[in-house]
Amino acid sequence: MNNDTILLENISKSFGEHQIIEDLNIEMTRGEIVSFIGANGTGKSTILKMIAGLIYQDSGNIYVFGINNQKKKNLDLCEFVMESGQGYYGYLSAYENARYFFGLNKIRYQLIEKEFLDLCQRFDFKQHLDKKVDALSQGNRQKLALIVALIIQPEVLLLDEPTNGLDSKSIHILSQVLLEYKQKNMTILMTSHDMSFMKAMNSRTIFIKNRNIALDTSINQYVKEDICIYHMCIADVEYEKFIFQFPQIELTRNETYFEVYVTDIQKNAIILEYDVLEFSKESMDIIDFQKSIEYVV
């Protein structure tokens, strides 16, 4: 077995009667940055939690650098950062929380103090160290969680929506810092709805749909500057005719008209057939990206 890969073999996972993941196979290499994207409830966070050994799959095998995810040793390899910086003690200060979690990971503060304070400075967090976590904003709780996880320096860093609550400057700093840690051969797996962040990271991107992989590609190979999505409002739609002509396009009723998200080619075809009230070019955010993927998979 390759000790430089994270391997998911025939993974299935259900919660009650609701199957989230079915027969999933993924191989990731040490030092990769991988983003998992998809609609809410498609199992992105579940995949990360299974890799980290926080929950277990119903069937199949997961190996993290040769170690089964159900072995206790796997927990030493992985650090999972929950969405919005959850998991810290609200009645303790940010500094006290950091010292506590460093201690849990057998890290002597004296050895990492400079790196810790440097990261706090870069994230504009130093002035918040003495505040109770309960008094921190969502963004500052997220910064604390990210800083602590980076100082711990796990072999695999798992981030659930790491940009939640962060302003644009902090997101830019985060992308720079993560790329620096990638150079140290850290493997970074994350879920995200932030297209510009994923592009800055040039991450491998795995789109999850219908309980499995719909697309596995480099974000910068797929999303090029000339790709765009159009938002159209259409009047007088013959519904049956429309879905027969464009079965892959989701048509949404909005009071007296219908809305669709379409590619450039589809926009031109629709204009020839239907009364288009208006259309606009949308920025390529994650919703548009997901919709555009549906046209090619």
Image (spheres, grey):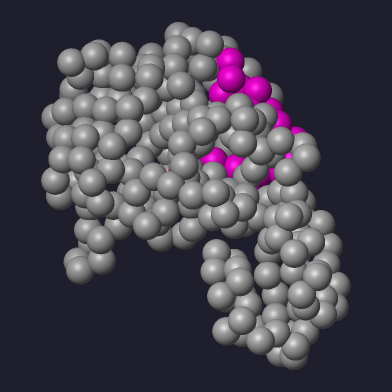
Q: Position of residue 143 (x, y in %)?
A: 58, 37
Residue 99 drawn in magenta: no
When asked about the image quadrant of residue 60, the answer is top left
Q: Nearer the viewer, residue 30 or 249?
A: 249
Q: Position of residue 114 (x, y in %)?
A: 57, 12
When asked about the image quadrant of residue 11, the answer is top left
Classify residue 147 as left or right of residue 125. left
Q: Position of residue 175 (x, y in %)?
A: 63, 28
Residue range in magenta is: 160-180
Q: Residue at position x 71%, y 90% from top? A: 255
Q: Nearer the viewer, residue 109 or 242?
A: 242
Q: Position of residue 172 (x, y in %)?
A: 70, 31
Quadrant into which the N terminus falls = top left
For the stretch drawn in magenta, the main secondary structure is helix
- Looking at this rendering, what residue extends furthest in the bottom direction? 256
Residue 45 seen from this side: no
Against 175, is 160 above or below? below
Residue 200 seen from this side: yes
Q: Residue at position x 20%, y 68% from top? A: 17
Q: Residue at position x 42%, y 54% from top? A: 209
Classify residue 23 as left or right of residue 263. left
Q: Residue at position x 25%, y 51% from top? A: 22
Classify residue 275 as left or right of residue 237. right
Against 288, is 181 above or below? above
Labels in figure, total = 0
When asked about the image quadrant of residue 199, the answer is top right
